[in-house]
Image: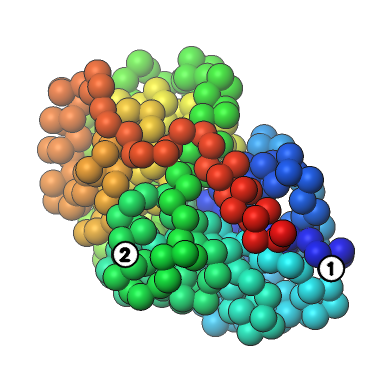
Amino acid sequence: MSADAVLHVAGARPNFPKAAPVIRALDRHGVRQRLIHTGQHYDDRMSEVFFRQLGLPEPDINLGVGSGSHASQTAAVMTGLEELMLAARPALTVVYGDVNSALAAALVAAKLGVPVAHVEAGLRSFDRSMPEEINRIVVDHVSDLLFATSPDAVTQLADEGIAAEKVHLVGNPMIDTLLANLDRFDVDAIRTALSLPDRYIVATLHRPGNVDDAADAVDLVKAMHAVADHLPVILPLHPRGRGHLENAGLLSHRALRVVEPLGYLEFVSLVRGAAVVVTDSGGVQEETTMLGVPCLTLRPNTERPITITHGTNHLVTRAALAETVASLVAAGRPAVWPTPPLWDGSAGERIARVITDLLR
Ligand code: UD1
Ligand code: UDP
């Protein structure tokens, strides 16, 4: 690895649509780059499909860490990365979002004195029972460049005492990817492929707070079945939730269909055509906001409040889910809706400019 390269570390599904526009923009600026895949996600549908569809470069190395407890997964990424960074010290390490791979990479780089850039800094759910919240806080506090997707994140970082000169409001690289692919989202094709009617609900579920506990899973399945009583539901299911949700009877409603995780283009096409989306995903709250698709987030909080204040997102409880879906379907899609500032497709370019300034 070239000693002056920018090292990107990605490993889980949400990292890939965030990294793609940053890597592309840095390429345009002629910056030497390396991409390390940690292997946190490894199924074709959780990983490779994004490389094929988004034009991401083949990773230089895949650490192949796979699944495990938080400590073992984080430690495996740390050990693998430390060896690589000691062998060829990068000029900068770029980490994405709030996953364990980002935490591990930021810790290793910071301790080796390699500058760290955090893409998607400053988001807070204020809920430390979420593993991601711990990751967000730690990564932000060891980072040298903090790229924020929304003004509330900038304010939060200031409140936590992080120096303003490190923080850059750049917009949202995941939205760069969405906007760059708008022509490729084909609602009719995906509806035909999945034999869906004109009006349908899309759901995604994978948060530990929703799917890890067997009793919660029963509650959640009841709520989802009540939604399916109203309109057909299609649920591309993250592998994390499969066991508990299926044991809780998820598959027993004929209007609720579970499919494997979808490729990015197929998934966003499905979302684009949905009457309402029910989710606990971070990225999906943002994508629905841009597409103007009503979104119900099955969580008590969100680290992305801008999707509520400037978008189509609402928090909802399991108990209120079916009734809220029904009222949103009846109201129809908004004709106009606000979108967050700088979610304009140029976040990758803004990030690349800051990075090239630093490298100079
Ligand atoms: C991780 C992130 C979460 C993010 C989510 C996106 C952390 C702490 N969590 O959660 O923030 O929202 O990714 O999708 O980093 N599995 C497979 N195949 C795979 C990957 C995982 O079957 O390719 C299964 C394994 O049983 C594994 C489980 O999913 O134990 C959880 O995977 P893991 O990466 O630990 O966490 P996620 O729930 O995916
Ligand atoms: N996604 C996908 N196929 C799916 C579900 C999700 O391509 O079946 C995409 C979608 O664009 C989403 C991104 O993967 O924004 C990250 O999703 P995930 O919910 O796994 O992670 P989070 O954003 O919650 O961390």
The one nearer the camera, 174 or 156, is 156
SS class of the residue under badge 2? helix
Which of the numbered marks, if any, corresponds to residue 3? 1
How packed is label 2: few (under 14 Cα within 10 Å), some, or many (20 or more)? some
The one nearer the camera, 127 or 144, is 144
Image x and y of residue 54, in percent: 66, 37
Q: Which residue is mark 2?
A: 156
C-alpha distance separating marks 1 and 2: 34 Å
Q: Does residue 167 appear to the left or right of 323 in the view shown? A: right
When the figure is inspected, residue 70 is found, relative to residue 242, above or below; the finding is: below
Q: Amino acid at mark 1?
A: Ala
SS class of the residue under badge 1? loop
Residue 209 in view = no
Image x and y of residue 333, in percent: 25, 23
How packed is label 1: few (under 14 Cα within 10 Å), some, or many (20 or more)? few
Residue found at x 29% / y 70%: 159
